[in-house]
Amino acid sequence: MKGFGVITKGQVGWFEKPDYVCGELDAIVKPLAISPCSSDVHSAYEVDSPFLKDMILGHESCGVIIEVGKKVKDFKPGDEVVIPCTTPTFWHPDLQDTPHQHAGGMLSGINFSNTTDGTFADQILVRSADMNLAIKPKELSLEQAVMITDMVTTGFHGSELAEVKFGDTVVVFGIGPVGLMAVAGAKLSGAGELIGVGTRPNCVALAKEYGATKVISYKDGDLQQQIMEITNGRGVDAAIIAGGDNATFNTALAVTRAGGHVANLNVFTELPKFEFGYLETGAGFMAHKTIRGGLCPGGRRRAERLISMVTASRFDPGRMITHRYTGFDRIEDAFMRMVNKTPDLIKPIVIM
Amino acid sequence: MKGFGVITKGQVGWFEKPDYVCGELDAIVKPLAISPCSSDVHSAYEVDSPFLKDMILGHESCGVIIEVGKKVKDFKPGDEVVIPCTTPTFWHPDLQDTPHQHAGGMLSGINFSNTTDGTFADQILVRSADMNLAIKPKELSLEQAVMITDMVTTGFHGSELAEVKFGDTVVVFGIGPVGLMAVAGAKLSGAGELIGVGTRPNCVALAKEYGATKVISYKDGDLQQQIMEITNGRGVDAAIIAGGDNATFNTALAVTRAGGHVANLNVFTELPKFEFGYLETGAGFMAHKTIRGGLCPGGRRRAERLISMVTASRFDPGRMITHRYTGFDRIEDAFMRMVNKTPDLIKPIVIM
Amino acid sequence: MKGFGVITKGQVGWFEKPDYVCGELDAIVKPLAISPCSSDVHSAYEVDSPFLKDMILGHESCGVIIEVGKKVKDFKPGDEVVIPCTTPTFWHPDLQDTPHQHAGGMLSGINFSNTTDGTFADQILVRSADMNLAIKPKELSLEQAVMITDMVTTGFHGSELAEVKFGDTVVVFGIGPVGLMAVAGAKLSGAGELIGVGTRPNCVALAKEYGATKVISYKDGDLQQQIMEITNGRGVDAAIIAGGDNATFNTALAVTRAGGHVANLNVFTELPKFEFGYLETGAGFMAHKTIRGGLCPGGRRRAERLISMVTASRFDPGRMITHRYTGFDRIEDAFMRMVNKTPDLIKPIVIM
Amino acid sequence: MKGFGVITKGQVGWFEKPDYVCGELDAIVKPLAISPCSSDVHSAYEVDSPFLKDMILGHESCGVIIEVGKKVKDFKPGDEVVIPCTTPTFWHPDLQDTPHQHAGGMLSGINFSNTTDGTFADQILVRSADMNLAIKPKELSLEQAVMITDMVTTGFHGSELAEVKFGDTVVVFGIGPVGLMAVAGAKLSGAGELIGVGTRPNCVALAKEYGATKVISYKDGDLQQQIMEITNGRGVDAAIIAGGDNATFNTALAVTRAGGHVANLNVFTELPKFEFGYLETGAGFMAHKTIRGGLCPGGRRRAERLISMVTASRFDPGRMITHRYTGFDRIEDAFMRMVNKTPDLIKPIVIM
C-alpha cells in the first residue's frame, strides 16, 4: 500500500507500507474521498510523539469496502461507507460507564494518524467494522460523507456539551469548519440568537447560511464587550469554543451567564497550562457555569444519525468544501494547501 | 368590558362584564390579535365545569398594555406584548421543585378561559405581568405572536418531553396545528427521519415544509406497519402524540423502540381510562420506554425564547394561519369556523 | 454437566447435558452459591416459551472460574466472580444509543434460563466474560455476592428510573426482595420520607432496617388514602413498583405528584393489557408524570459498582437471606421452597 | 435591635440598629440558635466591599417567628423555622431558566451579611418568607436545624454538581464542615469508594462516620499519587473540592477520570486567577471532564427536603458541633473561636 504522511517531525512525504492483513472484526476500505484537517498539519509539524514516524496521516474519509473479516456481519465488499474519524474498538468494559472516546484510556477512541496509519492511503484499515462503519446512502455526496466523519460530529458536539436548548443565546468562537458546524448544530439544537466570532468573508457568509444571526470580529472591538451589548448585558446561555487561545477561553467564560455552559472543541496542544480569571470563572467557580470539552463522538450509530440529518436536508456540510482535487496523487497538494492556508480556504477535498 | 364566551354548556354568545381592576402585579392588555383553539370549542360544548358559566373563552392572544399594577417593573402602558396561554402566578414554593404548570396544584398554571376570563374580550387581565409577558418585537408579526402563545410552546414541548436529540427518528401523530409545531420543534431538536401522520392535503404540505421527511396516512394501511417498514423494523426513537385516541397512544407505544420516548401533547378529556397492550408497553414496562405528557410551558422566558427563534428565522409559525378575520366583532365568526371545521382549516386569526 | 430446571411447562427436575465448550470470549464458572428467584418459578410453571424445554433454570449466582476463552484478558481460572443475571454480548451497535439490556433486540440482555441454560447447574457458561464478570472480593460474602446479581441491581434500578434525589418522598409498592432493595436504593439516592407497602412482619422489619420511614399495609385501609395522608395531600415525588397488579400500578400513578416519576420493576407477564384511569394518569397524561420501567442493568461495571457499595458498608443485601441450604443437591429444595412460599421466606440460598 | 458584626474591615463589634419594619412578604424571626461560619471571618477581615460597614454578620440560624407580613400565607408568629443562608426574593423572571442563586444577578440569592444584615442579631429579617422558610419539626434539634442552613446544603450540593451515582468512586478535598457534609451527601448519592482528604483527627474520625471509606493526608505523600493508587490507576468518577487552593483544584482535575466530574464548593476569593495544567484538564479539555461549581441552593423546598433527610435519620449533621455556647452574648465568643481556630474545632453553635 501507498500513503502520504509524516516521515519524521517536520518532514512529510509518500511511502510504501505492506498491505493490511484484515483481522476478523476489521474491514479494509479503498478511499473514494479524503480531506486533510488542520490537525494533520499539526501532527506533521508540531507534535512530538513516538508514533509519528513513517505514519500515514489523515482521519477524514469515505470509501468502498474491499475486504471484511470473517466475523463482520453487517458489511461486505462493495459497500460504500462513511468512516468516522473516531473508531474505538468498542470492546472494553469502560464503555459501560465512560464516553466511548476514552474507553480503555483517555482519547483511545482516536487511532487514525495518531497511533495507527491514517486515511491518506490507498487502503484504510477499520477496526471493529460492525461498530464503526456506516453505509453511505446514494443521496449522500462524497463531500457530505467526508465532512460527517469529523467536522460535523465535532462541531455538533459543541451543542451537546453545552446542552443547548430552545431559545438559547449561543456564541461560537471561531468559524472555521468546526465552528461552522458548531453553528449548524446549535441551530438544530434550538438556538435563537446565535453569534459567530470570525473575520474571513467566506466564513462569515457561510456562518450566516448555517444559522448565525450575527457574526462579530475582533476587528470591531473587544469581543466580550460586543457580546455583552448584543445580549443586553445578560451574557450567553452557551459558549462554544472552536478556535482561539487561552484568552478566547477566558472570554468564553466571561460572557457566559450564571448557570450557562462553556463547551470546548478546540485542540490546545501548544498550551502547557490554562489561566482563567476569578471574575471570568464566575466569582471563582461559584456561578454554576459548566465547563466541559471533549473529543468528538465516533462509531456507527453516530455516523448513521448524522447521515440521516443530511439526507433529511437539515443542513449541507458539503457547502464547506472550497477546494477540490481529483486523483489519489493530489493528496499531497490538498495537504499542502492546508499547510499554506489562504483566507479563502475552508475545507479541501480529494476525490479519488 | 365586552367578551365572547360560553354562557352555559352548549350555549355561546357575547356578554358584558365589569372592567377589570388592575392588581399591583397585574397588567391589563387590549388585544391586537386572538386565535380560537379547538380547546375553546371543547370548553364551550363538552366540558362540565362549574367555572364554565358566563366565562369568556380564548387563551391565545397578543396585545398592547393599557394599564400595569404599581409593582410591575418591566412593562408599561403602550408596550406590545405576547401573552402566553399558560400564566402561573409564579408565587408558590412548588416552583422550587415542580414544573411551573402545576405549582400549587395540577394544571393551575392555566387560568385563561378555565378558571378566569379568557382572551376573547376587549380587555385581558394578565396576572404576575413581569413573570408572564414578553415584549413583541416589531419584526414579529401578529400572526407569529399569537401562534407562539400556545401552538408553538405546546408543539415544541413534544421534543422536550421526548428528549429528541441529533439524528433521532421521530414520529408525530396528528398534524393539526399542535402536530405541525411538534414537527418544527423536532426538526430544531435535531431529528433526522421525521414522520408525520395525517391526511389533509394542506397539513401534509405544511408538515413537509416544517421538516417532515415523510407523511403517512391511515388511508394507506396500518400505521404501525407503515412506521416499522420506514424504520426497517427498528421503530422510532421518539413518538409525539398530537392528536388521536387511545388506539393512537397504543400505536405510539408500539412503534417506539426499547429505550425510546413517548410524549403526549393531546388532550384526552373524553377518556375515562386508557388501555395499553402488554406488548405495546414493552413486555409490560420492561423495555425502558419513557412515557411523559404535559401541559405546555408558559411564562415570560419561554415566550422570549420562542420569539427569539422566530425572529432568528428558524421557522415561521404564521404559515399555519389559513383564515383571517378583521375586527373585534369577528371573534364569533372565527370561533364558529373552529366549531364547524372544514378540511382547509388549520388556524384562524382575528386581527383587531 | 448436571442441572435442575424445567423439563416441560409445569414439570421440573434434574437432567444431564453435555459439558459446555468454552468460546474464545467466554468463561465457564463452577457455582459457589446460587439463589432461586420467583421468576424461575414463573418460568417453570407459567410461561409458554419454545425455549423452556429441558432448560436449566436460575440466573442468580457467583462462582469460581474453571476455564476462560483465549481472548479473555482480565479473568483466569481460579478467580472468584460475581455473575450478573443480565449478561449482554456487549457486541452490537445498538449499545451506542440504546440501553444494553435491549441491544440487538428487546430484553436480549437476559439469557440465563430464558434462551440459554441458567445457573442451577454444576457449570455456568458466561458469554463476553470480560464485559460481564466482576471479581468477588474476599470481604464480600457469598450471600451478598448472589444478591447483587439480580435483587440489588433490580431494586436499585427503581431509583434510577425514578430519578430519586435529595429529600424526595418515595413509595415502594411491594417489599419482597426486589422491593427491599428498592428501599435501600432509594435511601442511597437521597430519599427523605420513604414509604414501604407490605404486610409480612419480617419484610416490614427489614424494610425499616433498609431505610423505610413507614410501612403501610392494605390491611389498614385504602393505600392511596394512606399515602395521601402521610404526604399531607401532596403525593410522592417517586413511586417504585416492585410487586402487585394493574391496580397497584394505577395507585402508583394516582399518588405521584405532578412532575413526579413512576418506575416499574415488576414483571407483569400475566397481563394482556393495562388499564389506567384518566385522573390517575394526571388528567390524561397532562401532568408531567414520567412513567418508565425496565429490566435491571447488567454487565461488569454495574456489578463492580454495586460490589463497591456493599464493601463500603452502605447496605447489606445478605440480610435478605432467610433460608440457607448446603450442597449442590439442595437446589431442588431451595427451588421448591420458592414454589411453596411461606410468609417467613424472603430469599433462599444454596451454598455449594 | 442589637447585633454583632463588622464595623469596618478588620474591626468587629456589637452595635445597635433600628428594629426591622416587616414588609408584606417578609417575616421577622428571633433566633434560637446561630452558628458562625468561616466566611463570616472572611467577611470581617479579608473582603473589600462597600457593604461591609456596620454590617451584622452571620447567615446560619434558626428561630421563632415574631412577625409576618400581611401577604405571608404559610407562616405565623410562634412558628419555629429553619432559615436558609441563601434566600432569593424568588421574584425574578430569571428563575424560569437560571439557578435561583443567581436570579437577577450572579450570587444575588445570598444576602445575609453580604448585602443586608445577617443573623448575629436579636432579630432576623427574612424576605419572601413563604418561599424561604421551613418549619422546624420538633424532632429536629437546634444543632441540626442550624447545620442544614448552610453546611448541609452546601456540602450536599457537591454530589449534585458532580452527578454522583451508584458505585461512583468519589474524593472530597477538605473535611472541614462543608467537606464532611460533602462526604455524607456523596454516600447518600450512592458513592462506593469515598475518599476524604484531610488531617485533623476529629475530622478524620467524623469523615469515616459520615461515610468515608478512606481518609488520606498530604502528610503521607503526594495526594494525586495516593488517589491513583487507591483507584488502581483509574482515577475517580467525581472530585468534590471543599477546601484548599489552586493546587488542590488542579489535583482534583488530575485525578478525575475521562468523563468524570469536578465539583467546586470552595470559596476562592483570594485568587486573582486560576492555573490548570494541560494534562490535568484532560489534554486541554478534550477528555469530557465536567467542571462545575456553585453557591449552595436555598429556599423553602430545599430546606424541607434536607430536614426530611435528617428526621429520616439518614445522617446527623449535629455531630459536627464541637463547641457550644449559651446565650445571645456569647455570639462574640463563638465568632472569635472561629477566628482563632484550634485543631479540635469543627463547628461552634450559640444557643440563645
Image (tube, coloured by chain):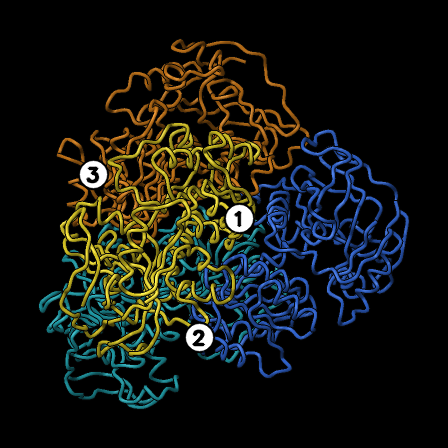
Chain colours: A yellow, B blue, C cyan, D orange
Q: Residue C343 shows which numbered tag?
A: none
Is mark 3 in CB contact (under 8 Å) with mark 2? no
Inspect the image, locate mark 1, and give the three-letter code of the amino acid beneath it. Lys
Categorize mark 2 by other alpha carbons within 10 Å: few (<14), some (14-19), many (20+): some
Inspect the image, locate mark 3, and give the three-letter code of the amino acid beneath it. Val
The residue depicted at 40 percent of the width and 44 percent of the height is A343
Is mark 1 in CB contact (under 8 Å) with mark 3? no
The residue depicted at 18 percent of the width and 72 percent of the height is A23
Residue A80 drawn at (x, y percent): 35, 73
Q: Is residue C95 left or right of residue B121?
A: left
Image quarter for residue A83? bottom left
Residue B124 drawn at (x, y percent): 79, 44
Alpha-carbon distance for marks 1 and 3?
A: 54 Å
Tag nearer the camera, 1 or 3: 1
Vertical placement of C172 versus B202: above or below? Answer: above
Inspect the image, locate mark 2, and give the three-letter code of the amino acid beneath it. Arg
Residue B90 drawn at (x, y percent): 63, 41
Residue identified by numbered label 3: D215
Vertical placement of C70 versus B320: above or below? Answer: below
Q: Is residue B47 left or right of residue A119?
A: right
